[in-house]
Image: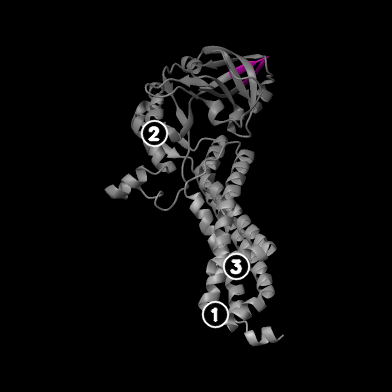
Amino acid sequence: MLFRILKNSFLKRPKAVLLVFLSIAMGAAVATAFLGIAGELSHKMALELRNYGANILLEPSAVEGGGFLREDDLPKIKTVFWKYNITGFTPYLFGVADFSAGGKKERGIVSGTWFAKQLEVPGEDPSIQGVKGIAPWWDVQGGWPAGPDEAIIGATLAKRLGIVVGKELDAVVHGRTQRFHVVGVVTTGGYEEEQLFAPLITVQSLLQQPGKVSRVQVSALTVPMDDFGKKDPASMSKEEYEKWYCTAYVTSVAKNVEEVMAGSRAKPIWQIASAEGSLLKKLNSVMLLLTVLALVASATAVSTSLMASMAERSPEIALMKAVGADRFQISAIFVGETLIISVAGGIIGYLLGDQLAGIISRTVFNSALASPLWLFPTALVSALIVAIAGSVVPLQRALLIEPVKVLKG
């Protein structure tokens, strides 16, 4: 009997059913898209933020290393526990040099580094490490050094020396002279504009520091810091330390790197790490808020459609009450209708939302989005929440209908 009533209800009121179905489907679709994006947002945004500089600085410890790190130890960075989170690194060797070009002389910093070095690590895939990977925001007019005597010069230093791309300059350190061919001028808006950047091996020879580096900048994917992540590892219990070590906090990744680099001290670059964590938390909050607002809007649309439908069906409800239907039976009919529509709307909403999330991911992040397994039941639950929330008030109105007044009028 209940099935026949539900069937007739759908067939006789296709427009009202379609409006409710569309409201639920759109709410489920938007919720699916936003939650699908939110699930991948931290990872994708962390990847995007890696383009804005390293977040870990590796320096010689105060006690060991003699003020330098060993270049031979650098491949070990790609063997640590969080090796797949480390997107890139580059070493630097700094020295003070006297530069001369075209009759002008200036004292400045000569920096040896990797620009795009292919790193071979036993048991791991080859990777390209260097400045080009961890600092893509450097604006280089000209080209990048390819030979041992080629260099790029900071824009401020180049202006003082009157150097342009294609010219040569001499760098003198303790009586030793190295001539560099300038292939590019770099603009960063920071201290890099006061330096000359050349291949690490050439600067090591000039400074007579073979196989040594002054510091290493490491770029790693990390999770936002919380109160637990900021705790001092020395004060943690064994269980807390294991949890901290196995969570990709910037502090635990830095600890990983420090353990494999002899005589080193790794510390997060807090200006970048804190800004990233704060931004990711805010973005996740925004996505959740938008999801809630979409569901509220959808529930309001469902409620409006059902109120209009209830007004049309007042005689039908009054007649059911007149022939003996109680509150439970009337509720079962309308709740059954709503649940059937919500399940259908949830399925369609999930399919639409999954496609919408994929479009957003390709448009914003230029990458595909893997739909997580929990998204389908979440879409169904969202549809049920919208349907139930939207049908509460109309159902209450239906149960308050007085058969005598309706049928008489």
- What residue is pinned by disc 2? 257
Q: CA distance from mark 1 to mark 2?
A: 73 Å
Residue type pointed to by label 3: Gly
Q: Is residue 396 above or below residue 242?
A: below
- The image position of residue 71, as x and y in percent, is 41, 22
The residue carrying pointer 1 sits among few (fewer than 14), some (14 to 19) or many (20 or more) residues within 10 Å by Cα, namely: some
Q: Is residue 288 above or below residue 73?
A: below
Helix, strand or loop status at disc 3 = helix
Q: Is residue 335 above or below residue 320?
A: above
Residue type pointed to by label 2: Val
- What residue is pinned by disc 3? 390
Helix, strand or loop status at disc 2 = helix
**CB-based contact (under 8 Å), mark 1 and mark 2:** no
Residue sitting at x 34%, y 30%: 64
Between residue 44 and residue 90, name the one nearer to us.
44
- Residue 106 is labelled as none
Residue type pointed to by label 1: Ala
